[in-house]
Amino acid sequence: MQKENVLQLFLDFEKEFIETLSTSNNFCIALFNRNKELLFSNDAFQGLIKGKAPESLINPTFDKLLKLNSNNALIFEGILTIGDSFSINPSIEAKIFSKKNKILILGEISAIHLLEQNATMHLLNNEINNLQRKLIKEKHLLQQTLKELGKANEELSELNATKDKFFSIIAHDLKSPFNTILGFSELLYSNTSSYSPEKNEEYAGHIFKSAKSTFDLLENLLDWSSHQTGKLAPKIAPINLLQVIENVALLCTPIASSKNILLELKLDEPLKVQGDSQMINVILRNLVTNSIKFTYPKGKVTVETKNLKNEVVVIVSDTGIGIETSKLNKLFSIECEL
């Protein structure tokens, strides 16, 4: 059947054809004049253009269509891309005709190009999701790094406070035994000829004991410093607590004597316990020297033990000024000043 006969068959449905094509969302119709004026376009074409209709023809452009020459009315057949240069644009399978200074565009959306665009969008979405996951991971790593830096700063501040406190303790705790050594040395140096051999021997003994006590004190302070900086691990073993306490008393007696303070021991026996003898020595020495420090002359410091069923309690008491209530909760802080 010839085309003219087909057209004649459908003339009775001309109105329905025009109405359907005008409102179609799939088949595009646009009619321009050669001055780039849009004379008519249906809903499908209107949904594709962005901005001015002639400028929405990307490939081929409207100017390129104007330059196409053909012996037939059909000047272009193929893929026409519509949209702008800033986004992913749809394409239609188009036939473009030129007749009587008018350009007619007929076409339908290509399923192949839709699939390609969907695939492109899928890849873009995947890239965006991967980027988001990467950013979340980097944010978490940054937060973790900041947290670790904060912790390191806190530890550094604590170490600096420990260092300052350590030097303060060394300066203070070594002052008393050195005063004892200097005092007895001066007496011995100035009065050697006038003192009896027994007196000279007694003073020399005090100097020796004070020097030994000072050396032991320095060792204890260094051990304490190592413990404060986390370098000393406890070495648990059976120890004779009585012997540890007597060693501490021997170390602290010259300091107590220089202030005319009585250092008294009230010890139960037997005193076999599990612990680190060096750490217990450091703890008891600090308790006793603090008691001596804050006790007035002619006062008394007492070290007492109570042997209970499963433990031994050591009590260090004194007749001194005591500890202010406001400082009790800070006793185990390195910044605490008694």
Image (spheres, helix red, strand yellow):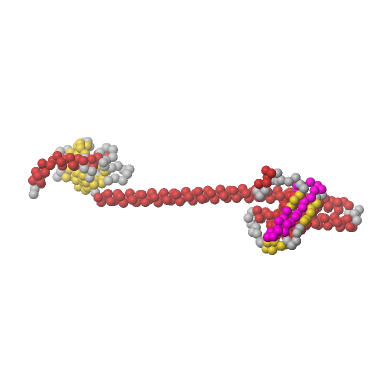
Residue 247 is situated, as x and y percent measured from the top left of the image, at: 76, 58
Name the residue located 76 percent from the left edge and 58 percent from the top edge.
267
Say whether residue 75 is magenta: no
> Seen in the image, is 145 located left or right of residue 132?
right
* 197 vs 142: above or below: below
Choose top left, top right, bottom left or bottom right for residue 52.
Answer: top left
* 338 vs 244: above or below: above
* 175 vs 277: above or below: above
Residue 249 is situated, as x and y percent measured from the top left of the image, at: 77, 56
Q: Is residue 247 visible?
A: no
Say whether residue 311 is magenta: yes
Name the residue located 74 percent from the left edge and 58 percent from the top edge.
245
Name the residue located 32 percent from the left edge and 44 percent from the top edge.
87
> Seen in the image, is 157 located left or right of residue 264?
left
Residue 120 is situated, as x and y percent measured from the top left of the image, at: 32, 50
Choose top left, top right, bottom left or bottom right for residue 282.
Answer: bottom right
In front of the other: 296 or 151: 296
Q: Which residues are magenta?
A: 292-315
- Label count reads 0
> Seen in the image, is 29 located left or right of residue 257?
left
Q: What is the residue that sits farthest to the front in this orientation?
A: 309
* 13 vs 196: above or below: above
